[in-house]
Amino acid sequence: MAYSTPLAQFPLRSPHEEDKQSSRAGSRLLPLPSPPSGGRAPHRASNRMRGRRLLNPLPLLLTPKPPSRPLAAHFRGARARARAAAHPPAPSPAPRRGPLAEPDVGITRFASPVPGFRGALKQRYSDFVVHEVARDGALVRLTSFDLPDVDESGGNAEGGDAGSDHSRALESFRLLCGEADHDALRRFLERALEGGDGDLSSIILSADADKAHRSEVHEFIKRNFKFLITDTVEHSDGTQKCIRVRLGSGPRGGRGRTKRGMGSSGWRDDRPFDSRGSTSWPYHLGKFLRFHLYKENRDTQEALGVIGKMLGVQPRSFGVAGTKDKRAVTTQQVTLFKVHAGRLAALNSKLIGIRVGDFSYVNEGLVLGQLKGNRFAITLRNVVAESDDVIKAAVDGLSKNGFINYYGLQRFGSGSVPTHFVGAALLRGEWKHAVSLILGTRVHYKGHGDIDVALSGIPRHLTVERAMLQRLKKYPGNYLQALMAIPKTLRLMYVHSYQSYLWNHAASMRVEKYGILQVVEGDLVYKKGCSLGEAATVDTFDDDDSQTTSPEMEISYETLPEEVIQSVQIADSEDLLKAVYTFEDVVLPLPGSETLLPGNDVAEIYHEIAKKDGISLIESVHGIKDFSITGMKGGYRRVLQRPIDFEWDLMTYTDETVPLVETDLAVLSKTQPSEANKLPSDGTSSCPSCDSGLDASLDTSRSTTDGTEASSEKTKSIGISDLLPKKLAVKLEFTLPASSYATMAIRELTKTSTSVAYQKTLNC
C-alpha cells in the first residue's frame, strides 16, 4: 500500500493550471473530518501558551507519556486489546517501484504564480557550491593549508602516573562503589605497576542500573586516575549496563580493540575505546583540532570515514554542525579530538576529492545544529526561456515572495524504500517489517533472508546493514535488537522523516486553503520579540552516561531542527485585528508531545494522514521512546522562507566542461599551487587544472539586491570558442538557515520538479 493522501495525489501543475483547478482541488480536501467526540475547543482567548503550559484547541494534543512497560505487557490489558481492535494497523506498504516524486511527499504548491523557466540543476557537481555559515556568521572557506602557529609540544596537562600512591583515592572509591569493585580496581592497578600493561585486559565493574551513579563513577575515575579510561558496556541480554575500565595507551590515544578476557560472562568487552583516552596532550592546546573540510562529490560521512581510516580514529571522534550534499562542492567546519594538525595536513597529498585546512585548536567540539546556515552558489545550465524578461520576473518572484519551506526529496532518501516508509513502520511497532525495508534491497538478504550468506556478500562500507545482520545472527528473530544496532541519530532520522512527510502535506494544505498573503485565525505564529536566533535549536539526545570519556553520538544524518516551543502561540481575532503578524511568522508543527497543532482546519490533515498509515499522534502502541512521536518533544518550522543576501547573474557559455563558479580550491591554486594539486576525479572536477578556460571576468560584475529586488542588466559571455553554439546559464547566490533546502528555492524559481529523474531529462 502506498502512502497516498488527497494531497499526495496532486500532480505538479503550472501556475495557470493551478488557477483553473484550485476550486476543484480545494473541494477534494473539504469538508475536513470533525474533531473526535469530546473535542470541544476552548475559548479563543485561552488559545495561548504561557510558559510551558500547553493550551490546545484540540484535546488530542495533550499527549500522554508513552507506556513504560515492555510491548508484550502493554498489550496484555483488556483496555489495550480494545484499543488495538478499534484501531487496526494499516497494511504494510510495499517498496516503491520507481523513483520518489515530489507529490509523493506532499510537495505540491508554489508561493508565487509567476511562470518559471527551464534549467538543469546539478548538471555538474561543481554547479552546486555550498559554504557553511558558522554560528558567528562567518563564511567557512578553505583558505590555507598552513599549520597553526603554536607549539604543539609541552607537558602533559592531565598528569597522573600509574606508579603514584592512590590509596586515598581507592578508599574513596570503596565508599562510592563497594568492596567488590574496590578490590577489582586495586588488583588492576597492582598489575599495571608490575609492568604488565602490554597485555593487561580491561576490567568491568558491577552492573549498575543507576545512570546518575554511573556518571559519578566516570567523573571520579577521570578526576583521580587520569591514566585510566572508562566507558559503558552492555550485557548480551541488551539491558544491564556496566562501566569498563582500562589503562591509557600513551600519546597516540586508544589502542583500538581490547582483549575480551571475560570468559563467558556475556559482557560486550569487544567495543573499541575512543581516542579520547589519550593522556599525553599538551596542556596549552585546546583538546579539539578544528579544521575546514573541502570535498567534491562526496557526502560528509564518506569523507570523514576516509580520513578516520587513514588516521586510525573512530568516526565518533569527529564533530560536525551539519551534513552537506554529496553531488556538490562543499566546505564546512569539523572538529577532531586530540589529533595534531600535522598528522591531518599530511593526508592532503593522499586524499581524493577531499582537502583539509585552516587548522586551529579549540576547547569544545562541534555538535549537530551548531551553525547559522549555508551559503549557496548554484548554476542552472541549459536555460530555456521565452526572453530574459521571463527569467528576471521569475527571479524577482523568488526574491520578493520566497518559497514554501518544504523538506526536499533528500530528506526522504535516495534508495528504493523512502525513509518515511521505515519511519511509519517503526511508529506502528512493526520491527520485522522495518528491518525488511532497510535490508530488503540487499540482494544477499532479499528473498531468502539467509544472514550468513548476506554477511559474506555485503560490502564492508555498508556498516549499518552489517551491524543489523550481525545483531540478528546473535539474537535470531529479535528484530528490535537489530534496529537498536543502528546509530541513534540514524534511528531517529527515520521517525523525523515521517514527521517531515506530515509537515509537507500540512504546508501544502495551508497554502492551498488560505494562500500566503495573510495570517488567518488559528494559525501558529512566532511571538513577537522572539528572533530566529533565539528560536532555533536542534533535537538533543538524552544519551546514556553523558559523563563518559567517549563521545555521545555517532556522526549520521543531520538532526531535525526544532524551534523553541515557548515562542509559539495560536493567532486569535485580536491579533488579526491589530495586524500583529505577517505570513512570515506562520509556522507548522513537527508533531510531538509538547507541540501545538493549528487552531484551524489545517490540524486535521495531520490526523487524517497518520490514520491512513495506521499511526496515532496521541499515544504510542509500544514503549520504545526512539520510535514514538509521543516520545519526542516535536518542534516548529516556518512555512515561508526568503533567500537571504540574494544575488544573481545571467551568462552565456559554450564549453560544458568549464566551471562557471570558482571553488575554494581553484582560488587556493593561485597562491599555493603546490598544495592545491589536482584532485583525481571523474572528469567533472572543479579542480584548478580543469579551470584553465575560466574567464577572469567571472567575478568582476555582480547584480545584487537588498532582498526586495533582483535584476541583471548585463549578460556576460564565457567560453573557449566562439565557433560553438552559445548556451544560457543563470548563476544564483543566497544564504538559507540551517535545514532549509536550496532545491526547494530552485523549484520555486523554475516551477519544475527537482527530482533526479526529471533533472536527467534536462541534462540530455
Image (spheres, rainbow, N blue to C red):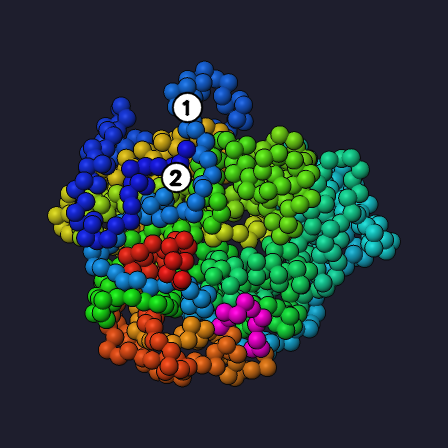
Q: CA distance from mark 2 to mark 1?
A: 22 Å
x 26%, y 79%: residue: 714
Whether residue 412 is in magenta: the answer is no
**Residue closer to the observer: 418 or 210:** 418
Relative to 72, 219 lies left or right: right
Specify the principal SS of the magenta part: loop
Tell me: residue 688, above or below residue 14. Answer: below
Question: Which type of secondary structure does the marked residue at label 1 adopt?
Answer: loop
Q: Which of the two discs, 2 and 1, labels the residue nearer the N terminus?
A: 1
In the rendered image, the quadrant that contains the C terminus is: bottom left
Relative to 409, 468 lies left or right: right
Residue sticking out furthest to the right: 194
**Residue closer to the observer: 304 or 338:** 304
x 37%, y 61%: residue: 762
Amino acid identity at mark 2: Gly
Mark 2 vs mark 1: in front: 1
Whether residue 680 is in magenta: the answer is yes
Residue 337 in percent (x, y) is at: 61, 61
Amino acid identity at mark 1: Pro
The residue carrying mark 1 is 88
Residue 13 in percent (x, y) is at: 25, 50
Tag of residue 592: 2
- Tell me which segment is drawn in magenta: 676-686
Q: Are marks 2 and 1 in contact (CB under 8 Å)?
A: no
